[in-house]
Amino acid sequence: SSELTQDPAVSVALGQTVRITCQGDSLRSYYASWYQQKPGQAPVLVIYGKNNRPSGIPDRFSGSSSGNTASLTITGAQAEDEADYYCNSRDSSGNHLRVFGGGTKLTVL
Amino acid sequence: QVQLVESGGGVVQPGGSLRLSCAASGFTFSSYGMHWVRQAPGKGLEWVAFIRYDGSNKYYADSVKGRFTISRDNSKNTLYLQMNSLRAEDTAVYYCAKDPPYGYGDYFDYWGQGTLVTVSS
């Protein structure tokens, strides 16, 4: 099975831009998806595919990918963006197994 | 609107069994693949299992293979997870999550609120 690596914690000043990264071999073949999780709540999809946002997700959230690294960028971070963020992709074996990154705790200062 | 409601969680002794259910509504359940994802207390998300829309193929994480079985009843719009030989490390909130339309990619577009499973003597 493959692994996805995320920084455990990242901080950003209110209104500034922050990038959360996710590294793994599977990202050379498959897009990452990104999930926001606030304490006591279920995860919520924020980015999928090349750079797609579900309905209701603010356009300050964007995604990108290069080589074995996927990134989630929040442009103009808001206090309500403080949460845990997880990346996910299909396993590099090519079957339907999925793998999550370890998660990044985002603090908005 | 899409709703996924998990049930069946509780406290079980090591070595015991439990069956989780996920009742789906607001979409054509029989047309979508479904997943189980879990989260141990204070830990990250872990993908557990996937079942195709028609139940024809099932896939499992190595950590649960041979002990857990995913299944579905499309006539009841319900997803299941049969968990046997439970271990302390299976203690987690278990979420069901929906696949997008076929061919749209690999992600989980809707999640339930989760059900807590505690394995303890």
Image (cartoon, rainbow, N blue to C red):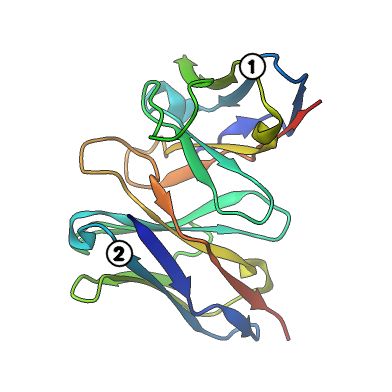
Q: Position of residue A99 (x, y in %)?
A: 49, 43
Q: Is residue B48 left or right of residue B76?
A: right
Q: Residue furthest right?
A: A109
Q: Is residue A1 visible?
A: no
On residue B25, the disc is 2
Amino acid tagged 1: Gly
- CB contact under 8 Å: marks 1 and 2: no
- Can you tell which quarter of the image residue B104 is in? top left
Q: Quadrant of residue A16?
A: top right
Secondary structure beneath label 2 = strand
From the top left corner, tell me how far across and down residue B51 is, in percent: 30, 59
Q: Which residue is mark 1?
A: A76
Q: Is residue B34 above or below residue A95?
A: below
Is residue A79 or residue B116 the one in the foreground? A79
Q: x, y (%) of residue A71? A: 54, 20
Question: Which kind of residue does numbered mark 2 sit on?
Answer: Ser
The residue depicted at 71 percent of the width and 60 percent of the height is B41
**How many angstroms separate mark 1 from mark 2 (CA)?**
36 Å
